[in-house]
Image: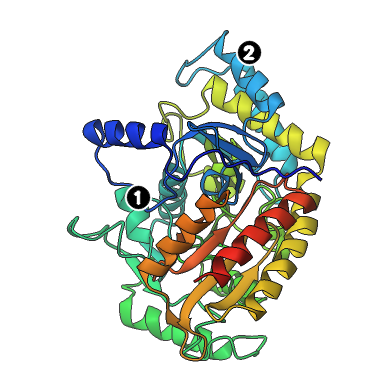
């Protein structure tokens, strides 16, 4: 079978070097460490750079292009709409109405309505406002290593240092607790107790010590994305939802990264039968178009009147045309089912690689979201150095594979290809990854 990867130059190639120099001359270099590649063209699971090198993509553009890069139906919908209407602010238009109708047909049955916005951070801000407004209270429970965006409110809700460091006081009312991590469970919160008694005793003590009696809600990711693809023990999310509701708090599930088929279910909430009051959506909802949304119960939306949730670009024609096209692609191509099937296959391949590599401490995942945690020592679980992680990213790129890293320690390799990936592409890309890991 013909290989998908095609390397024509060294990495970085000559055109890449020239463009990167020009880029840094005009735009501040404030992005994270990535492969030394300037993207030029992308189709499905393949990316071609300006030097003509073709790579298999394990990033999905940071878990965005769930339907594959530049899906023809998505591109056509955006092109046709752009020729008719680009922006109209709050006035209704057919694309927004159709997208809302299609999204609510997919939504959990207990949900009432949706509202379109432009970014995941904006969806976070809106969800927090909804819980505060309806409850009349202001305290929000969040989690260490969580990530919900980089605006003031969403960064305050997050539990990573980067988005907050050096920016002064965060938004008042945030209460932060530990997120259970089965691989690094120093507190024994994942010891197999189905009621998670030790954890919720701890959580009660956190509330008792920090709350002033104004608990509005909880916001949590189904798995922590930027925190290192940390999957909590099965049943914990449902227990947390029940705990929150028992205390009169609203429950927001941040599916900006985890939704739209990524975990092998269309909504991550389906994995444990969750019934959140709000679901935030982004990234995969537009698969490249700038669109996000909140889905909420009628009870929560009843707290807002006309004009109180406006967004300049939220629900714009091109974005909502894209959102509708993405939903149609999912149904036509059974992408959620492919995510579950190919994700299980990929997880098995990665675990086989782990057995033969002294630097892979853990492989974990659900659907087409897998984490490979790189450590300096498997016994101590000491995180690998930034230098080693950069060698992996660069080494993979040199052999035709695009991969990134995440996590509190920056030592978790992010394995999240488009949901269209095939066994052949998984085999080819895993072979590259194994070769790089063995060469360390």
Q: Based on the displayed image, in which of its 4 quarters is residue 276 positioned?
A: bottom right
Question: Which quadrant is home to the N terminus?
Answer: top right
Q: Is residue 264 left or right of residue 12?
A: right
- Report the residue that reaches farthest toward the front: 9
Is residue 258 something that shows in the picture? yes
> Pointer 1: residues within 10 angstroms few (<14), some, or many (20+)?
some
Residue positioned 59% across, 27% down in the render: 320
Q: Secondary structure at mark 2?
A: helix
Q: Is residue 137 left or right of residue 3?
A: left
Relative image position of residue 180 (x, y in whole percent): 52, 78
Between 210 and 376, the one nearer to me in the picture: 376
Between 294 and 381, the one nearer to me in the picture: 381
Q: Based on the displayed image, in which of its 4 quarters is residue 79 positioned?
A: top right
Q: Secondary structure at mark 1?
A: loop
Position of residue 274 relative to residue 380, above or below, is above
Relative image position of residue 125 (x, y in whole percent): 40, 47
> Pointer 2: residues within 10 angstroms few (<14), some, or many (20+)?
few
Between 173 and 349, the one nearer to me in the picture: 349
Relative image position of residue 140 (x, y in whole percent): 40, 63
Q: Are marks 2 and 1 in contact (CB under 8 Å)?
A: no
Give the label on residue 428, or none. none
Say which label, 2 or 1, has the lower sequence index.
2
Residue positioned 71% across, 74% down in the render: 352
Give the label on residue 150, or none. 1
Q: Circle 2 is placed at which residue position?
A: 80
Is residue 138 something that shows in the picture? no
């Amino acid at each position: 079978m013909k290989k998908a990867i095609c390397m024509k130059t060294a990495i970085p190639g000559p055109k890449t070097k020239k463009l990167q120099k020009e880029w840094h001359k005009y735009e501040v270099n404030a992005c994270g460490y990535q492969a030394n590649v300037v993207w030029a063209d992308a189709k499905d699971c393949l990316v071609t750079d300006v030097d003509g090198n073709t790579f298999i993509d394990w990033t999905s553009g940071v878990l965005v292009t769930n339907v594959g890069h530049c899906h023809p139906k998505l591109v056509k919908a955006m092109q046709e709409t752009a020729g008719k209407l680009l922006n109209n602010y709050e006035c209704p238009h057919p694309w927004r109405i159709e997208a809302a109708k299609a999204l609510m047909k997919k939504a959990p049955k207990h949900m009432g309505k949706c509202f379109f916005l432009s970014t995941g951070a904006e969806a976070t801000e809106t969800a927090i406002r909804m819980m505060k407004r309806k409850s009349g209270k202001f305290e929000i429970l969040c989690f260490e290593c969580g990530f919900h965006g980089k605006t003031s409110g969403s960064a305050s809700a997050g539990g990573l240092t980067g988005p907050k460091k050096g920016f002064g006081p965060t938004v008042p009312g945030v209460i932060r607790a530990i997120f259970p991590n089965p691989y690094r469970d120093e507190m024994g919160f994942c010891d197999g107790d189905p009621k998670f008694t030790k954890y919720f005793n701890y959580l009660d003590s956190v509330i008792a010590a920090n709350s002033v009696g104004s608990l509005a809600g909880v916001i949590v990711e189904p798995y922590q994305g930027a925190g290192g693809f940390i999957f909590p023990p099965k049943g914990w999310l449902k227990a947390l939802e029940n705990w929150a509701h028992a205390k009169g708090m609203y429950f927001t599930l941040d599916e900006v990264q985890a939704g739209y088929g990524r975990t092998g279910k269309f909504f991550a909430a389906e994995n444990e039968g969750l019934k959140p009051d709000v679901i935030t959506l982004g990234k995969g909802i537009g698969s490249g178009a700038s669109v996000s949304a909140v889905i909420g119960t009628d009870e929560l939306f009843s707290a807002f009147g006309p004009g109180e949730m406006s967004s300049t670009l939220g629900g714009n024609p091109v974005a909502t045309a894209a959102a509708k096209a993405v939903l149609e692609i999912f149904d036509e191509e059974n992408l959620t089912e492919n995510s579950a099937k190919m994700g299980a296959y990929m997880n098995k391949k990665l675990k086989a690689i782990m057995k033969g590599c002294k630097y892979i401490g853990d492989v974990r995942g659900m659907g087409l979201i897998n984490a490979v945690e790189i450590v300096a020592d498997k016994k101590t679980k000491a995180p690998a150095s930034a230098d080693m992680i950069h060698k992996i990213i660069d080494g993979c790129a040199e052999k035709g594979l695009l991969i990134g890293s995440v996590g509190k320690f920056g030592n978790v390799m992010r394995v999240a290809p488009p949901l269209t990936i095939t066994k052949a592409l998984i085999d080819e890309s895993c072979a590259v990854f194994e070769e790089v890991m063995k060469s360390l």
